[in-house]
Image (spheres, rainbow, N blue to C red):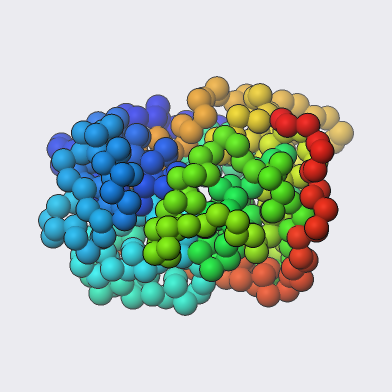
Amino acid sequence: MTTLPPAGSGVAPSGRPIRVAVVGLGWAGREIWLPRLAAHPAFEVTALVDPQPAVRDTARAAHAVPFAYADVDDLPAGAADLVVVAVPNHLHAAVAARLLRRGVPVFLEKPVCLSSAEAELLADAERAGGAVLLAGSAARWRADVRALADAAAELGPIRHVDVAWVRARGVPDAGGWFTRRDLSGGGALVDLGWHLLDTVLPLLGPATRITHAVGSVSADFVNDTAAHAVWRDPAGSAAAAGALRGDGSVGGSRGDVEDTARGFLLTADGASVAVHACWASHEALDRTTITVQGVAGTATLRCTFGFSPNREPTPVLTRTRDGETVALPLPAEPIGTEYDRQLDALPGLLTAPASRGAAVAEAHRTIDIIERIYRTARPTEPEREHALAGQRDR
C-alpha cells in the first residue's frame, strides 16, 4: 500500500511560508481552505477577496489576515505567491484566467471549468502569463483511495469500474447558486461527479481514451426542503449569489439542475465505467462506493467522500478472488485529511516543471466527459409532489 506522509507536515521549498490570497469566501473558501491555510506552516494568508464586506471582515478578524479586497483586480501586484480561487462555479475560469495572465499562480477549486471552451481559456492564460494553474482534486489524496489504487494495480487489466456517491439528503445550498444552472453549470454531476471522475480516471491510466459517454439525469429532490444539506450553511451561499447578481436576494428561486446523474463510459481498449452521482435519495446514509473489476479479481471501497456527518462510520476496502473476499488494511484518518495532504503537496507542485499544463489537461478530459453525458441526458422536471415530503428528518 502506498505510504502517505502525515498531513500538515509540508514546508515551502524556499524555507519561508508561501504568501497566499484566498478569493471567494463561500462555504469552500471559508470552511475548507482558509482555516487549513492559516494553520499550515508552509503558508501565510496575506489577503482575502470577497464582494461582501461583512464576510471579508469576519474572516479577516478570525484568521488575522492583514488585507482584504472586494475584487480580484484590487489585489496588488506581488501581494501573493499563490491565489486560491473558491468563487462560485461560473466565475472559476474567468477569475483564474485574469490572475494567470498577470503571472500569478492559481490553485483553483473544482470544477476547474464548466466547458471545453473554458478549459481552452485557462490553457491560453497559463501560457500567456507563464504562471502555473493547480487544481483541487481532494479525493485522490484520501488514504483509502490510494489503498484502492494499489489493490487495483494487482488485478491485471481493468475491465469495469463502478463508482457512486449517493447522499441521503444533501442538496447543497438550495435556493442559492448551487441549484441554478447559470451559476453552477450543473447539479450533482458537476459537483459530486467531478470528484468521482477525478478518482476513476487515474485508475484507468493517463493515456486511456474515453470513446463513448452517455447518461441520464433527474431532479426529483432538488426543490424538496427535506432533501437539503442541513450540515452546510445555506444562508452564506444564498447571500453570495445575491451579491453576484447585484440584487441581494435569491429567496424563492427554484433549482433547475439535476440532483441525480448516471453515466456510462467506454474506453478505447474496451473497459467500461458506470458513474452515479446523487445529491439526495431514499438511502439512510451518505455513501461512496468504488468497485474495480479486473482480470485477476475485484476490489471494492465503501466510504463517504466529503464532510457530511451522515456517513459510513469506517471506510472498508475488500478484495475478491476465486470466490474469497478478504478485508485489506486501511489507516484511520480524520474527515478532511485529504485537503491537508493536498496543501502539503502544493509547494512542490508550484515549482515542478511537470505541473505546467497538467491541471488544464486533466480538467479538459473531465469536462469533456461531463459535457457528453449532459448532451445525451434527458432532464426531467422536478415532481410537484416532494419526493421526501412527510419523511422524518435524519
Rendered location of residue 213, percent (x, y): 70, 69
Rendered location of residue 42, percent (x, y): 24, 36
Is 320 placed above or below 129 here? above
Rendered location of residue 291, percent (x, y): 73, 44
Residue 105: image quadrant is bottom left
Q: Tell me if residue 250 can be seen.
A: yes
Placement of the C terminus among the 4 image quadrants? top right
Placement of the N terminus among the 4 image quadrants? top right
Q: Tell me if residue 131 can be seen.
A: no
The residue positioned 22% from the left and 64% from the top of the image is 73
Residue in front for this viewpoint, 325 or 51: 51
The residue positioned 69% from the left and 53% from the top of the image is 223
Rendered location of residue 128, percent (x, y): 25, 74
Is 173 placed above or below 273 here? above
Task: Name the outermost residue toward the right.
Answer: 323
The residue positioned 73% from the left and 31% from the top of the image is 393
Residue in front for this viewpoint, 58 or 95: 58
Residue in front for this viewpoint, 60 or 217: 60
Is 143 placed above or below 279 here? above
- How many numbered circles are shown? 0
Is 226 placed above or below 361 here? above
The residue positioned 20% from the left and 67% from the top of the image is 102
